[in-house]
Image (tube, rainbow, N blue to C red):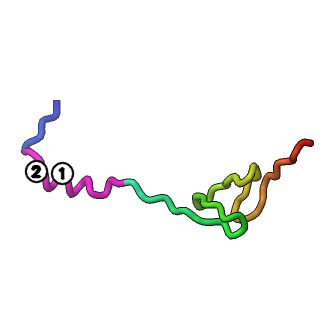
Amino acid sequence: MAHPKSRISKQRKRKRRTHQKATVPQIAICKNTGEAHLYHRAYEHEGNLYYRGKMLVQVEEED
């Protein structure tokens, strides 16, 4: 089995781990619907599917 020659200090270990963190997702607000959504993602508003402020799929209402 592999065996380290010397112990890694807490400071050295923590320096390596400082870059491993979650990023805050970017949220945009649509100018047409006012809906908050993630960038580069389609989003649903009142049953319709929107992307970049344009309606992609419209839900037809049944009588």
Tell me which amino acid carries mark 1: Lys
Q: Which residues are magenta?
A: 7-21
Q: Secondary structure at mark 1?
A: helix
Q: In the image, is 48 to the left or to the right of 8?
A: right
Residue 57 screen position, x and y as percent: 79, 52
Residue 38 screen position, x and y as percent: 58, 58
Which label was assigned to residue 13?
Answer: 1
Task: Check the picture and name the quadrant holding the C terminus.
Answer: top right
Which label was assigned to residue 9?
Answer: 2
- Asked if disc 2 and disc 1 are in contact, CB closer than 8 Å, the reply is yes
Q: Residue at x 13, y 51 (%)?
A: 10
Q: Is residue 15 above or below residue 6?
A: below
Q: Secondary structure at mark 2?
A: loop
Q: In the image, is 26 to the left or to the right of 60?
A: left
Other-residue count near label 1 (Cα within 10 Å), few / some / many at <14 / 14–19 / ≥20: few
Alpha carbon separation for disc pair 2 and 1: 6 Å
Q: Residue at x 35, y 54 (%)?
A: 21
